[in-house]
């Protein structure tokens, strides 16, 4: 038998981990000057490693804007990343550890489709307002009162794509090429239903495995069906590989349309590197969340985003990423709710977030955090209209703001070529069978 | 705080069960089951589809088979049985007289095949999206988010792990265990002595599979969701690393390995303070996990708790038959 | 029908890439008894090394040489600093597998912060797409096939016509006997890692060339088909790995045409399982190798 001290010594490691947990938690509620924390819980490693930084890029400018105006009721705020490693079983301890070690969490952003199902109940139970990026339809009628979603469910993207393809471009024959992961496959069903109901044809439906080094057989099969346009979302280098092979085997690129997830600097860099910027600019369009990239709210966001480049050099690249804009808005909404209720207790201010987003009678619209603080000091209620435009939470704290139809320009910026208002989107969803 | 502690306890219990199963299969019997995670996944999926309502419920956003809405403990029993049933077909394919490395590769590839098939057959188990909103056991009677429920769940997990530990100890220290070790050390000699190595291996394969199925049921009942991303083939390898670091060939080593690697290394690294651009620390955590495995294997190559050398002395003679420890 | 013929053509490229990689992998196993799970990560690291040079303006072919040199040195150092010391300590086969897993975790997560999560593409001209019947291949793809053929010929020449090659075969067959015959097995092993590392590097670069875009996540995707091809042909037998690559490569592409693309990898791996059921030692290995290591 081993000397007992060896076994005990090493068995202490998990005990030490628990001890750190206990020490780290502090378990004191925020005092009048202790800092508050915004947690960014998302994949930072693994196949979806590109998502976490995009959401971190929302937190930093929000924190900067808040701190420059004196913080939240005098508390400074900061951001911290919590890696879920891209799957629900690893996300659970990540979320639990985040909650246990940080009693000063004011809000949490991130929670993608990879892990939202397991993380949302934890955060709801811990009474922490969360702004999630999952498009899963299980959250369309959620009972989690702390759950907020500023992006539409994936199926709405699908309807918007179909509506735009048919109305704006007059495409009739569509090939569906979506990655076989959680987030991308959610589009296929609604897209097929909508196309059928609105009189177009699906020439082929391909679910492709991500990260393969070649899809030439799939491309050949797709080309044989002669579609007018390819609908696609396949993240990582997958879309780049696939579309490059389309170009090689067809002789030239085909028109293709992407979901809002394809409006992302990482995706742009990958695909333009593979097929050339010019081809991407001429042949590609996408639906993106209905933001205008202009106005005082967006300007304040952009100023702060550029300023945090010293901390996170890639941050300014996310200036037009819909997710980044919306999560920034969510954080500021939470902060303003805390200011209005003069409380750092989420059970008090969580319900007010909806009012800050939608506005109430007599509320004054503000576009910068400093203006919001000033108005609240004057005894007024505020409505936040920020980087992503006006919010309209429904009873399930889901917000939908219509879509814009966009193309890329040669530098990777978005160019709006059409809009679908919230009402138009709702009409398409109804007509498409959603 | 309660939630994190209970999470750690449940995860520790599940990992202990998994490592015990691997220890029985690999440490004692020499079967390199690199498809282990498939057994755990099968148990989790079984428990899920047995305990959930039919797939039209909750808005019908997912598609899966069955959906029998059975109350606890039937889903867990079903999961254990399915884990055991999965063993014979796989075993018949690979438990022939393959070298351990070929066995290992074949099972690894089977694990990848299983993952690919489930992902690309959405009608079966909802494909890549996986199954969510799995009801926790007895959640129609008790509030599954209350402190009391969580502590009871953790206690139940720990108790089950302890029971399986006792059973595993009995197996190892029995004549049956001696046959297994003999077969592991020298299969030819054991066969010459009349031990049916195929039957021995298959029996351990089934027992290990059952334990794996149970561990999956416990885990899915706790996290209420299960998707292919949770059971990729590297998960098996992490568990093997745990058993080898802890010391295989004995159950104390398996338990220690389970506490060290999947719980200890993976969780303690979450406390590294953040610095640098986002993504740097999370990547660094994995570097630490890999480095810790290498470090432990360097300084304690037989595992922290190596297998006990067994010495059998004849009644009055001085000729011990020793078994080599550690294999 | 034409889709199947086209798929057959694509399979030629896939098999070429797998062949280069699998021969290296299987030789590492044959000569040093090492199932090197970090092989895929070394491939992607070499691909990135070649990209660094290529992005600075160097032609893709020279960059491939850089990738090969990087792969050779990296693999050589990996063996010298980690694998060989552990093996000298007496770590057994499965322990070494776990060690290679730990190494792959470290490589992947050191690479990720360095190169980032962006995907990159080589700067190259894919050349015209040539059509022969239903088969459509770009100039680059034909070049990749040529590289594979050259690599296979060089390996054949190495193993049969050089003293080093014969020493490698002797070491693979029976290291103790080889040492007793005066073969400097340690030096042979060093060379083996350099050569197989170069193959690994070339394979990574051509995989990146063929896929037009790659990122760190591709590293783990490479590994399973390579292992499958090696084992199918008989682990440790380079010609077996070539045959295994042909089978895996063609099955992947043709089954995508025959069945559906979603199951193309399943079909290829199912072929491996079938072979292992019918002929457990692999296609080219002799039956006697069954009971040996373990």
Image (spheres, coloured by chain):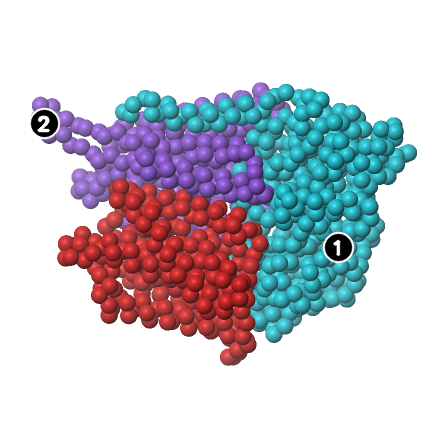
Q: How far apart are marks 2 and 1 (CA)?
A: 85 Å
**Seen in the image, is C92 located left or right of residue C46?**
left
Identify the colour of chain C in the image.
red
Identify the colour of chain B in the image.
purple
Q: Quadrant of the C terminus of chain B?
A: top left
Determine the residue located farthest toward the right in the rendered image.
Answer: A362
Helix, strand or loop at mark 2: loop
Residue A297 lies in quadrant: top right
Helix, strand or loop at mark 1: helix
Identify the colour of chain A in the image.
cyan
Within-10-Å neighbours for mark 2: few <14, some 14–19, many 20+: few
Q: Check the image and report above or below for A358 versus C134.
A: above
Residue B312 is situated, as x and y percent measured from the top left of the image, at 17, 28
Residue C40 is situated, as x and y percent measured from the top left of the image, at 43, 54
Determine the residue located farthest toward the bottom in the rendered image.
Answer: C132
Residue A268 lies in quadrant: bottom right
Q: Check the image and report above or below for B282 versus C207.
A: above
Residue B141 is situated, as x and y percent measured from the top left of the image, at 61, 23
**Seen in the image, is A286 located left or right of residue B156?**
right
| Residue assigned mark 2 | B318
| Residue assigned mark 1 | A160
């Amino acid at each position: 038998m081993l000397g007992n001290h060896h076994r005990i010594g090493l068995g202490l490691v998990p005990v030490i981990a628990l001890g750190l947990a206990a020490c780290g938690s502090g378990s004191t509620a925020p005092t009048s000057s202790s800092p508050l924390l915004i947690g960014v819980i998302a994949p930072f490693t693994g196949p979806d490693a590109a998502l976490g930084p995009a959401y971190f890029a929302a937190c930093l400018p929000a924190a900067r804007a808040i701190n420059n105006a004196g913080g939240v009721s005098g508390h400074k705020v900061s951001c911290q990343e919590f890696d879920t490693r891209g799957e629900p079983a690893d996300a659970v301890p990540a979320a639990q550890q985040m909650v246990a070690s940080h009693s000063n969490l004011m809000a949490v952003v991130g929670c993608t489709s990879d892990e939202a199902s397991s993380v949302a109940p934890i955060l709801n139970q811990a009474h922490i307002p969360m702004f999630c990026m999952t498009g899963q339809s299980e959250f369309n009628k959620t009972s989690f009162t702390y759950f907020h979603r500023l992006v539409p469910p994936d199926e709405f993207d699908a309807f918007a794509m179909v509506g735009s393809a048919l109305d704006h471009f007059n495409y009739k024959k569509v090939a569906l090429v979506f990655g076989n992961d959680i987030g991308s496959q959610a589009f296929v069903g609604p897209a097929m239903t909508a196309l059928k109901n609105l009189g177009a044809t699906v020439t082929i439906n391909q679910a492709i495995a991500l990260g393969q080094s070649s899809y030439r057989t799939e491309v050949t099969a797709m080309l044989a069906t002669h579609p007018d346009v390819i609908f696609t979302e396949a993240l990582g280098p997958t879309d780049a590989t696939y579309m490059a092979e389309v170009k090689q085997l067809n002789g030239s690129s085909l028109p293709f349309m992407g979901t809002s997830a394809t409006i992302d600097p990482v995706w742009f860099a990958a695909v333009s590197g593979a097929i050339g910027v010019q081809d991407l600019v001429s042949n590609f369009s996408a639906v993106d969340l209905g933001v205008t990239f202009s106005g005082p709210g967006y300007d304040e966001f952009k100023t702060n985003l550029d300023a945090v480049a010293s901390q996170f050099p890639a941050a300014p690249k996310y200036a037009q990423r819909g997710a980044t804009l919306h999560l920034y808005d969510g954080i500021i909404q939470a902060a303003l709710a805390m200011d209005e209720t003069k409380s750092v207790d989420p059970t008090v201010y969580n319900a007010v977030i909806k009012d800050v987003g939608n506005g109430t009678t007599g509320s004054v619209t503000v576009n910068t955090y400093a203006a919001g603080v000033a108005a609240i000091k004057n005894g007024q209620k505020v409505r936040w209209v920020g980087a992503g435009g006006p919010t309209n939470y429904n009873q399930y704290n889901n917000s939908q703001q219509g879509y814009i139809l966009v193309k890329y320009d040669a530098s990777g910026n978005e160019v709006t070529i059409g809009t679908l208002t919230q009402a138009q989107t709702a009409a398409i969803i109804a007509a498409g069978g959603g | 705080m309660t939630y994190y502690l209970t999470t750690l306890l449940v995860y520790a219990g599940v990992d202990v069960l998994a490592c015990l199963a691997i220890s029985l299969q690999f440490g004692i019997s020499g079967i390199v089951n690199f498809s282990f995670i498939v057994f755990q996944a099968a148990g989790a999926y079984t428990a899920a589809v047995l305990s959930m309502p039919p797939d039209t419920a909750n808005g019908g956003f997912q598609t899966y088979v069955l959906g029998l809405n059975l109350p606890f403990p039937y889903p867990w029993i079903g999961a254990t049985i399915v884990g055991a049933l999965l063993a014979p077909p796989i075993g018949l394919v690979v438990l022939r007289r393959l070298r351990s490395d070929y066995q290992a590769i074949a099972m690894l590839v089977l694990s990848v095949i299983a993952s690919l098939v489930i992902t690309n057959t959405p009608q079966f188990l909802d494909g890549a999206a996986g199954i969510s909103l799995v009801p926790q056991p007895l959640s129609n009677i008790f509030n599954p988010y209350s402190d009391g429920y969580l502590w009871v769940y953790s206690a139940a997990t720990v108790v089950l792990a302890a029971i399986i530990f006792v059973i595993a100890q009995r197996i190892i220290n029995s004549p049956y265990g001696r046959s297994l070790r003999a077969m592991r050390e020298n299969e030819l000699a054991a066969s010459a002595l009349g031990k049916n190595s195929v039957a021995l291996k298959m029996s351990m394969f089934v027992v290990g599979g059952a334990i794996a199925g149970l561990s999956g049921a416990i885990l899915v009942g706790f996290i209420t969701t299960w998707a292919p991303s949770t059971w990729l083939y590297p998960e098996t390898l992490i568990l093997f690393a745990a058993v080898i670091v802890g010391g295989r060939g004995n159950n104390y080593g398996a338990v220690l390995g389970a506490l060290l690697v999947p719980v200890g290394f993976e969780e303690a690294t979450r406390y590294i303070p953040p610095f640098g651009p986002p993504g740097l620390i999370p990547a660094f955590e994995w570097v630490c996990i890999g480095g810790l495995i290498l470090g432990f294997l360097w300084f304690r190559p037989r595992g922290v708790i190596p297998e006990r050398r067994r010495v059998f002395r004849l009644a009055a003679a001085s000729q011990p038959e020793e078994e080599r420890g550690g294999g | 029908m034409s889709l199947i013929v086209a798929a057959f053509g694509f399979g030629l490229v896939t098999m070429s890439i797998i062949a280069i990689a699998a021969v290296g992998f299987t030789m590492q196993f044959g000569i040093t008894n090492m199932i090197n799970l970090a092989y895929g990560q070394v491939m992607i690291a070499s691909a990135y090394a070649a990209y660094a040079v290529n992005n600075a303006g160097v032609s893709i072919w020279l960059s491939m040489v850089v990738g090969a040199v990087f792969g050779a040195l990296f693999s050589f150092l990996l063996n010298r600093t980690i694998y060989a010391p552990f093996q000298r300590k007496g770590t057994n086969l499965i322990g070494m597998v776990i060690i290679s897993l730990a190494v792959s975790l470290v490589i992947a997560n050191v690479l990720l912060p360095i190169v980032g999560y962006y995907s990159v593409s080589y700067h190259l001209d894919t050349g015209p797409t040539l059509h022969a019947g239903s088969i459509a291949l770009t100039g680059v793809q034909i070049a990749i096939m040529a590289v594979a053929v050259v690599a296979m010929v060089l390996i054949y020449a190495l193993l049969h016509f050089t003293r080093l090659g014969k020493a490698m075969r002797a070491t693979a067959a029976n290291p103790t006997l080889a040492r007793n015959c005066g073969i400097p097995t340690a030096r042979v092993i060093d060379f083996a890692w350099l050569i197989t590392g170069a193959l690994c590097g070339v394979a990574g670069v051509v995989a990146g060339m063929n896929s037009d875009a790659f990122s760190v996540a591709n590293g783990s995707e490479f590994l399973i088909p390579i292992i499958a091809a090696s084992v199918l042909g008989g682990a440790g037998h380079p010609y077996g790995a070539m045959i295994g690559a042909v089978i895996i490569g063609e099955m992947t592409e043709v089954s995508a045409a025959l069945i559906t693309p979603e199951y193309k990898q399943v079909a290829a791996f199912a072929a491996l399982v079938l072979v292992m059921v019918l002929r457990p030692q692999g296609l080219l290995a002799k039956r006697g190798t069954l009971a040996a290591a373990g």
